[in-house]
Amino acid sequence: MFNWLLRLFRKAQPSEDLQSSLAEKGMHSSVDPSREASVVNREATIDTEAITPEGVSWVAFDESLLERARTQWQFGDWESLASISRESLQHHPERARLAVLVAAGHGQRGNQEKLQQFIRLAQDWGCSRKLISQVLISGVQNSLGLASLAAGQTDRAKLFFEQSVRTGMPGADLKLLSGARVRQQRQLLGLHVSN
């Protein structure tokens, strides 16, 4: 039913049309015609926590945000992760996981205050201690990899970056991701990027 309602709102039908359309189909709706649905973009999705007895509240969120954030984490794009705002996470169904990834971005950029803020959000939003621990430990391993790169210990750095990816996202393609992480981190340090 939610998908059907979503299609109706995407066509920008007024609330009265929705009520009459539901009546024609023999359905009853608790949608209050005086409330206007807010749809920000074509990827708008219902936040089931926002359903109230008075009607349906529509909250848009970026459906691809989690996948983008995971990719940014895997490749070590800390700046992009750290640029994700709390507001963009607020109504996302995977906001707890996203908050942990954003925290990792802030941690790698040295912003401890933001790191702690997003970890607290992740906890408040129900993120497991295990996932938080995995991502934080992974961040320490990444930092050790950076230190090894800066000291010219490339082989040791590769091991730390591989362990960082393995700890943070078990089951990921280690060879592909650790190689990409090495290149990205070398670039962050201003070192010549090589394979």
Image (tube, rainbow, N blue to C red):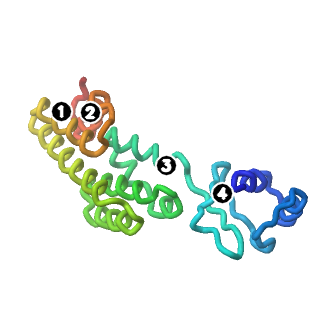
Q: Mark 2 or mark 3, which is nearer the start of the sequence?
A: 3
Is 148 displayed left or right of 137 in the figure?
Answer: left
- In the rendered image, which residue does mark 3 sit on? 65
Label 2, label 1: how far apart the Cα atoms are = 7 Å
Q: Mark 3 or mark 1, which is nearer the start of the sequence?
A: 3
Residue pictured at 33% horizontal, 35% vertical: 172
Callout 2, which amino acid? Ser
> Which class describes the residues within 10 Å of circle 2: few (<14), some (14-19), or many (20+)?
many
Query: Image quadrant of residue 103?
Result: bottom left
Secondary structure beneath dot 4 equals: loop
Identify the disc placed on residue 40. Answer: 4
Q: Mark 4 or mark 3, which is nearer the start of the sequence?
A: 4
> Which class describes the residues within 10 Å of circle 1: few (<14), some (14-19), or many (20+)?
many
Q: Is residue 108 visible?
A: no
Identify the disc placed on residue 178. Answer: 2
Callout 4, which amino acid? Val
Query: Image quadrant of residue 131?
Result: bottom left
Label 1, label 3: how far apart the Cα atoms are = 28 Å
